[in-house]
Image: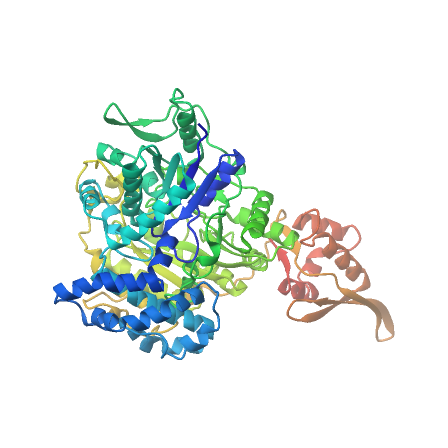
Amino acid sequence: MKTKLFVITPPFTQLNTPYPATAYIKGFLNTKNIESVQADLGIDVILELFSKKGLLDLFQVSSFRFQVHSEISDNSKRIFALQDEYIKTIDSVIQFLQGKNPTLALQICQEDFLPEASRFAQLEELDWAFGTMGTQDKAKHLATLYLEDISDFIVECVDENFGFSRYAERLGRSANSFDELYEALQQEPTYIDSILISLLKAKIEAVKPTLFLISVPFPGNLYSAFRCAQWVKQNHPEIKISMGGGFPNTELRSLSDKRVFEFFDFITLDDGEVPIEELISNLENPNSNSYKRTFLLENGEVVYKNNSLKHDYKQSQVGTPDYSDLPLDKYISVIEIVNPMHRMWSDGRWNKLTMAHGCYWGKCTFCDISLDYIKVYEPVAASLLCDRMEELIEQTGQNGFHFVDEAAPPALMRAVALEILKRKLAVTWWTNIRFEKSFSKDLCLLLKSSGCIAVSGGLEVASDRLLKLIDKGVTVEQVAKVTRNFTEAGVMVHAYLMYGYPTQTIQETVDSLEMVRQLFEAGVLQSGFWHQFALTAHSPVGLYPEKFGVTKKTETIGTFANNDIDYTDSTGINHDKFSFGLKKSLFNFMHGICFDYELQDWFDFKIPKTKIHPDFIFNALEEQNDFNTKPNAKVVWLGGKPFVQVFTKSKKGRSWEMMSLTFHDKKESFTIQTSKDEGEWLRSILDKISVSGAKSYTFQEVKNDFETSLEDFELFWYSKPVNTLREFGLLVL
C-alpha cells in the first residue's frame, strides 16, 4: 500500500509565519514524488479561538469559573464584563492583523474602539514612541495588547497553560521524567485541547494518512504533540505516528521510558529526510527493517535503531521548502515591542531558508556543538540558494526571507548578495551571524544593497575574559566595530546576551551591562535579549563540567528528556537575582532612553560600581583608516554606467583634455572629473567590475589592468574621484 503522509507543527510557535520544518520536509518529499499534506495547527487553533464564535464559547466556558471562584482578579472581571465589546471587535481586529483590513487602523488609533485591560497600562510609558510610529504600526501594537489581554483572561479563567508561542511549556522543559506529562495526558482535555482535537479530527478525516509526522521544535509544542498523537492512536490505530524536530533532537537522545510509545510508534533524531524515507520503506515493505536514527518499541523495550546504509542527503539534494497547504494569508502580524528590530520575530511573513547546515565556527562552549545540527557544517551554493528564493517568491507571493542559520558564513553571505544583485532580485532578508571582523564596512554595504535589513548575533557575555572562556572568537571591541559597520550601512543589529556563565562574577555581570549600555548609547545596537546561561548535556560545559568550575547535581540520566542539567557554580552566586534588572534596563535602552541612569538604579540590591571606562566603546569606534587592501579582495561596482563629457582645461597657457563622468545614484546624482586617459580607463573598468558582470575581478587584477596603460595606481586609487566612487558603491570585499 502506498504511503500518504500528514505532517504537522502542533501549537504553538509563531503567529506571523509558519515554522519551516514541515515545509522543508514536504520540499524533500516532493523530490521523491511522495504525496504529503502539511498543517500548522498552531495558527489554526488561534484563528478558531480568536473569532466571534470562539470568544462566545470562551466566555460561556469561563462563566462557570466566575460562579465558583471568588479569587478572580479585577482585570479578568473587567474583561468578562466587557465581553460584548471583545466579541464585537475580534473578527475585524484579526482581519486587520492579517493585512486584510488596513483602514481599521484609523479607528483603532482613536483609542475608544478596542476594550482595554491591564496590558494597556504600559501605553503611558510608551506615548513618546508613537510619535515615530505610523498609524498602521501604532494600531498593530494596540491590537497586540488587546489580544494579550484576552490571553491573560484565558490563562486565569480557562487554561493556565495557554501562551501564544508556547503551550504547557513547563511540562516539556527539563522533563527528565515523563511522569508529570503522562499524568497531564490522563486528565480530561482542556478547552484549548478540545479546539485542537476538533481541528485535527477534520484534517485526519480529509487527508486519510497512513503515516502521521509531528514536528516538535520546542518544549512548548510537546504537550500538544502528545495530545494529537493520543487522539489519533485512540481513534485511528491503523495510522503510524512519528515525532521529529528540534525537541527530540536535543532532549530525547537517551529516551528509555516505554510509556512514550503508547502515543508514538517512532521518534527520529537529527536531519529527518533519510529517517522518514526509511519509515516509509518499512511501512510499504514490512521485511525492510532498516532504520536511520530511530527509537521504537521492540519486544516491549525501547530500542534505538540506526542500521540504515543510506547516507544523509546533501543540502543541494533536499529540494526547495514547499509552503503549499499552509494558509499563508491568514497568519497574523503583531508588534509586542515597538523597537523596529525586535518586532521582526513577530511581524511580517518570512520565507525561511538555510544558507548552511550547521555552524562553521562550532566552538562555543555553551552550545550543543557535539550534535549534528551544529557539528555537520555544509554550505549551499549561492546560485542554488537564489534559485530556491525565486521558487519561493513564485510559490508564496512573498519576497521576504529569514535565513535560519546557526551562523551564516560571511563569504557565503557575500556570494548570495552578489548573486541577488546580479539577478536583479528585489528581496528583503535577514539572518543570524557571528560578529566576525570579516564584516567590513564595504561588505555590510554590499549586504544592504542586496536587501539585507537586519542581523542578529551572539555578543553573549560582554567581557573579554568570558568571551575567551566561551571560545567565541571575538572581543567586545571587535563586536562594537562590526555592529557599527552594519548600523552605518543601514542594517539593524540584534545582540543575544548572556548572564550567569560559569565563573562569572558579580563585577563581570555589572561590567557586561555597562558595555551593553554603551553599545546602545553609541547607536550601534538596536535590539537585544538577555538569556540566563543553561547547562546543556551536549555542550562542552555539559560534557566536561570540571573544566569550567561546574558540578552537576546528579549524574543520573533521565528516562525521558535529558538536556538542561541542574548544576552548582564554584562562585556560589545566585544569578537569578540579576534577571529583572538586566531585562528592564535593556527594555529602556532598546527604546533609546535611560542611558544616564546609574547602573545601581536597575537593581534593588547593592551592586559594585562598573570598572569599564565610560568611553570604552566610543574609543573603540574611533575611525581607523585601513590602507592595506588585500590583493585577492574582490572589487565590485554597484552603480550604473556614467554619462561622459570630454572638455579641455587650461592653466597658465597649458591645456589638456579632461573627462567628467556623471552618475545617477538612487538617491542623488554626482559628477567626478579625471584626466581623459584615467576617465577612459575608469569607464572601462567600472563596466568590467559591475555587479551584473560575468566575471569577478580582484584588487590585484584591477591594479594590473590600470598599469598596462597608466602609472601610479596607488595615487589614483586614493584620489578624490575614486574616494567619491567609494562612497557611492565602489566596494572592496
| Residue plotted at (20% across, 71% down) | 77
Q: Nearer the viewer, residue 277 or 689?
A: 277
Quarter of the figure with the N terminus = top left
Q: Looking at the image, is 472 positioned above or below residue 585?
A: above
Examine the rendering and report whether any part of residue 314 can be seen.
yes
- Is 707 displayed left or right of 505 in the figure? right
Quick one: 10 or 372, which is closer to the camera?
10
Between 519 and 214, which is closer to the camera in this rendering? 214
Q: Quadrant of residue 628?
A: bottom right
Q: Position of residue 483 (x, y in %)?
A: 46, 60
Q: How is the image coloured?
A: rainbow
The total number of labels drawn is 0
Side of 608 relative to 26 (left or right): left
The residue at the point 44 percent across, 32 percent down is 3
Q: Is residue 107 above or below residue 374?
A: below
Residue at image coords 70%, 50%: 693
- Residue 42 in picture, x, y percent from top left: 36, 52
Q: Which residue is at a point 41% across and 31% down the rendered structure image?
A: 275
The reply to whether residue 362 is visible in this rendering is no
| Residue 14 horizontal side relative to residue 416, left or right | left
Q: Note whether 568 is above or below 3 in the view shown.
A: below
